[in-house]
Image (cartoon, rainbow, N blue to C red):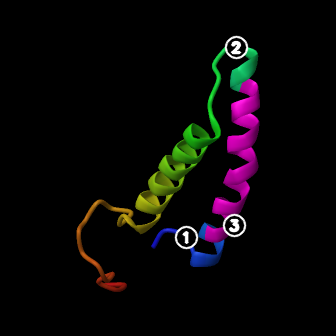
Amino acid sequence: MRISKTSLVIVGALLVPVVVELRTALSWFGVELSILESVALAAVFVLAIVVWAVWPPDGDAETEPSGLD
């Protein structure tokens, strides 16, 4: 994992106000998001962050690091 599980939870918690404020900021430009659309957008953000976090940093599909050779 690229970041610890604790950090992942913290990022998820910080994402909630970001999505709420994004909804407010988009309304200034005439883009209205329903609450369901905001939840879906937050789910996409969380999924993207989780995929990034668990993806191996070097793009290799190896699950365990080979160690320090």
Q: Most extreme residue toward the left, as rendered? A: 61
Residue 67 appears at what percent x and percent y? Answer: 34, 86
Q: Residues within 10 Å of mark 3 (few under 14, many from 20)?
A: few
Q: Earlier in the sequence, mark 1 or mark 3?
A: 1
What is the magenta segment's predominant secondary structure?
A: helix
Residue occupying the point 57% across, 42% down: 36
Q: Indicate the secondary structure of the residue bearing disc 3.
A: helix
**Label 1, on which residue?**
3
Which residue, given by chain and number where applicable, does mark 2 sit on?
29
- Is the residue marked by circle 1 packed among few (<14), some (14-19), or many (20+) residues within 10 Å? few
Amino acid type indicated by mark 3: Ile
Residue 20 is covered by the magenta coloring: yes
| Residue indicated by mark 3 | 10
Query: Magenta segment, which residues?
Result: 9-25
Q: Which element type, helix, strand or loop, lies under badge 2?
A: loop
Q: CA distance from mark 2 to mark 1?
A: 35 Å
Number of marks present in the image shown? 3
Q: CA distance from mark 3 to mark 2?
A: 30 Å
Instruction: Return the x and y of residue 32 as percentages of the image width and height.
Output: 65, 23
Please report whichever mark, 2 or 1, sits nearer to the chain's N-terminal start.
1
Q: Which three-letter amino acid code belongs to the residue tagged 2?
A: Phe
From the image, state whether disc 2 or disc 1 is nearer to you. Answer: 2
On the image, the x and y values in percent for residue 50 come to 47, 62
Horizontal relation, residue 35 to residue 60: left or right = right
Tell whether 20 sits left or right of 3. right
